Amino acid sequence: MPVDQKQEEQNERIIRLFEQQLAQSNRQIEALTEQVRQLTKALYGSKSEKSKYQAPDGQVSLFEDDPSFNEPEQTEEQSTETISYSVTRKKKNKKRNDSFCENIEIEEIHHHPVHLTCDCCHQEMVEFSSTLVREEAKFIPATMKRVQHFEHIYECKACKKDVSQKAQIKRGKAPQGAIQRSIAGPTVLAKLIYDKFIQYLPLYRQVKEWERHGLLTNDKNLSNWVIRVAEDWLQPLYDLMKQLLTAKSVLHMDETFGQILKRSDGKPAQSNAYNWVSRSVPSEGPVIVLFKSALSRGRAILEDFIKGFKGTVICDGYSAYGQLPDVQFANCWAHVRRYWLKAESKNGQIGVQYCDRLFHIERKIKHLLPEERVQIRQQESKPIIDEFFDWIDRSPFFGKNAIAKAAEYTLSRKEALMVFLENGNVAIDNNPAENAIRPNVIGRKNWLFSVSEAGAQANAICLSLAETAKANGIDFYKYLVKLLTDLPNLPFHQQPEILHSYLPWSENIQVTCAK
């Protein structure tokens, strides 16, 4: 072979090698650029999932934020708005963002002139009208009372004189307290639990507030009170709610991390513990929300949590959700949408648009019966999903960038993402579970950790009752007062059916504890 031809072939091989290296470098640069953009957005960008483009066909995005959350709190001077025009000015009164509840008690204060004698003729003046000039809120601080229970004993003097008769003695019976040999009454315990799990006020910060009201205690005592109440009086209701929950056919599930200092598995306190949540769907009766504290995120925890359940679990893409007997798993389209939203490219916008069209349909049919929802989903949603997956299959999404991750996440969960098309009780997303677990996340930022596993499980029980009460329109404080007043004096261990009348949706509780 001539020398020139060999040299030419060698040069071509070198050029091809350089071209391959250049293509590989370009792909690496593209991936790193995408990574830098994602990290920059995570650090400085908006955290909202609101789309940055107009939805097709004039559809309104399901993820629009409530505008009331974007407006600053107004002062009295800001309660009117001046709108300028080229010729005239008009004032538009804005609705006040502070007002009174309808059932608030009214106290009237009447102001009369100091002297009712006419300055001119010195005759007595007569009132002819009155004007309401302003309203103001008046706060009366809570008061602490030291309640002492006395049992009075009576005897019959006539029977006492008759030696042939047995002396008759009667004694007034004081009701049992929620915690024996403790000064904490039902209202104190109810406020303690309410402030921690609804107001997210840590126990160590409650100590000073109790002292201000006249109750001297410490955070260790408060913690023990929460654990005792949860174990003695709330646990039976929690177990009954779990029994009713696992009898449902559709559940939402999610989990989030926590921290337990004294762990029984030998791991250091810095290791993550987890809180699991399960929530029923409104179409299957009163909503039940149940939390469970665990040391791990393993599948064994999930199996124990929903032991006996047969049906469909709506969840995210975590690998523990899967391959359980008698359980079908449906994945969440909101998670799919988030992956495409992160891409922030033309293809990413197309993926988000497909998801928004599905959510738009769901918003229209959410008040329909399950059978009607299935029919409309088959007619309108299924063609959109088929078109969506066909578009992903035809598009060359490769590499480790955001758009490739979105495509891989969507395709790998295709079967689970289509479950909602066949079952009207199955929601398109897992947002109810994420909303249910949010109080746990907010609380974690305030009380930081649980010292013991017993404390963590007490938190889970209290959160379960709090969120279930909230979902059923119950005032949690009133509910706790009633539970801690009635249950210590009821034989519910011998007659478990009594507990049914103390569930948040029961007629008894709805009448006495509704908001």
Image (cartoon, rainbow, N blue to C red):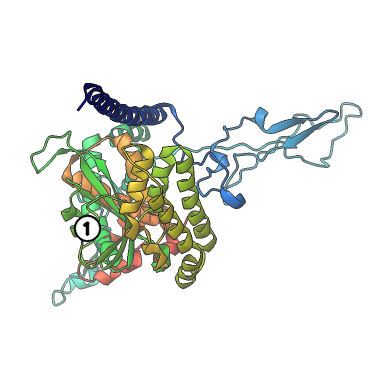
Q: Give, as a three-letter code, the residue at label 1.
A: Phe
Q: Is residue 431 visible?
A: no
Q: Quadrant of residue 156?
A: bottom left
Residue sitting farthest toward the bottom: 164
Count of numbered circles on the image: 1
Q: Residue 426 location in percent, x, y?
A: 39, 63
Q: Is residue 414 visible?
A: yes
Q: Quadrant of residue 54?
A: top right
For residue 282, above or below residue 84 = below
Q: Residue 39 location in percent, x, y?
A: 36, 29
Q: Quadrant of residue 500?
A: bottom left
* Front residue of 352 and 130: 352
* Front residue of 223 and 260: 260
State left or right for residue 412 relative to residue 513.
left
For residue 105, above or below residue 418 = above
Q: Secondary structure at mark 1?
A: helix
State left or right for residue 368 relative to residue 284.
right
At a point 38% along the width and 43% down the height, the residue shown is: 339
Q: Residue 55 location in percent, x, y?
A: 56, 47
For residue 87, above or below residue 469 = above
State left or right for residue 314 relative to residue 221.
right
* Front residue of 492 and 152: 492
Q: Residue 207 location in percent, x, y?
A: 30, 33
Mark 1 is surrounded, within 10 Å at the Cα level, by few (under 14), some (14 to 19) or many (20 or more) other residues, namely: many
State left or right for residue 81 relative to residue 212.
right
* Front residue of 192 and 164: 192
Look at the image and tell me in which quarter the N terminus lies: top left
Which residue does the numbered mark 1 point to in the structure image? 305
